[in-house]
Amino acid sequence: MKRCFDFFASFLALFFLWPVLALVAWRIKKNLGSPVFFKQVRPGLNGKPFEMIKFRTMRDATDAQGNPLPDCERLTPFGSFLRSSSLDELPELWNVLKGDMSLVGPRPLLMEYLPLYSPEQFRRHEARPGVSGWAQVNGRNAICWEDKFKLDVWYVDNASFLLDLKIIFLTVKKVLIKDGISAEGEATMSKFTGGDS
């Protein structure tokens, strides 16, 4: 039932939102240049890698050694707007349609985090990663990693269709009030370094 809902809901969303997607892509091309999309390999169900697609929100700025500058220096005002409105997440509907992701589930993080998880934290990968999730509607990026993973595992243990509908409703509310967009003192979210960080 969850997969059927994900498929039809993402298909309908892409069908009706294509003018918004086209407009955002045009504005990114105009403000940030190419590429319009940000693609990155992330761990999916059971940690299996997949390529996640989002709208690009940062400049390709590097230091003298060629290393990317901190997020706060690469994130433009337009990029901040895309993040705060969650418009940058819309292309993930394509990942949902393909079956890489679900509308609701633990957010897909970085591949480099996989060996840093405790066995309990790794359980977040027992569900397909989601466009939104229980951790996102209970603090988003404003809560610490330990709490975020506890919420992810709680979702894995308590997942249901009604809970998914509740999370979708709360997600819309969170987006409208722009709550928990970034961690305190960070442009986005601090890096996970293992343990209870």
Image: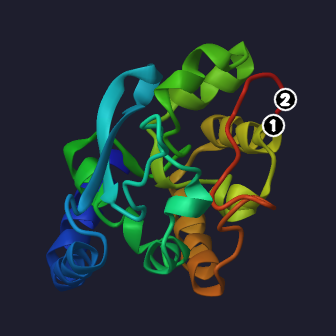
- Give the mark count: 2
Which residue is drawn at the image coordinates 21% and 84% (left, top)?
23
Q: Is residue 38 visible?
A: yes
Question: Is residue 185 shown left or right of residue 37?
Answer: right
- Determine crowd level at label 2: few under 14, some 14-19, many 20+ residues with C-alpha closer than 10 A: few
Residue 100 vs residue 117, the one in the foreground = 117
Tell me residue 166's x, y (percent): 60, 67
Tell me residue 99's x, y (percent): 26, 41
Which residue is farthest front? 64
User: Compared to 135, does 166 lie above or below?
Assistant: below
Residue 196 marker: 2
Q: Can residue 162 be seen in this view?
A: no
First of labels 2, 1 by sequence position: 1
Q: In which quarter of the image is the C terminus?
A: top right
Which residue is drawn at the image coordinates 53% and 46% (left, top)?
107
User: Compared to 46, does 98 lie above or below?
Assistant: below
Residue 21 vs residue 5, the one in the foreground = 21
Marks 2 and 1 sit apart, C-alpha to C-alpha, by 5 Å
Which residue is drawn at the image coordinates 25% and 58% (left, top)?
37
Pointers 2 and 1 in contact (C-beta within 8 Å):
yes
Residue 146 marker: 1
Question: Is residue 135 shown left or right of residue 33?
Answer: right
Question: Is residue 120 shown left or right of residue 34?
Answer: right
Residue 178 vs residue 172, the one in the foreground = 178
Residue 74 marker: none
Tell me residue 121's x, y (percent): 70, 25
User: Compared to 136, does 69 lie above or below?
Assistant: above
Question: Is residue 179 shown left or right of residue 42?
Answer: right
| Residue at disc 2, secondary structure | loop
Residue type marked 2: Asp
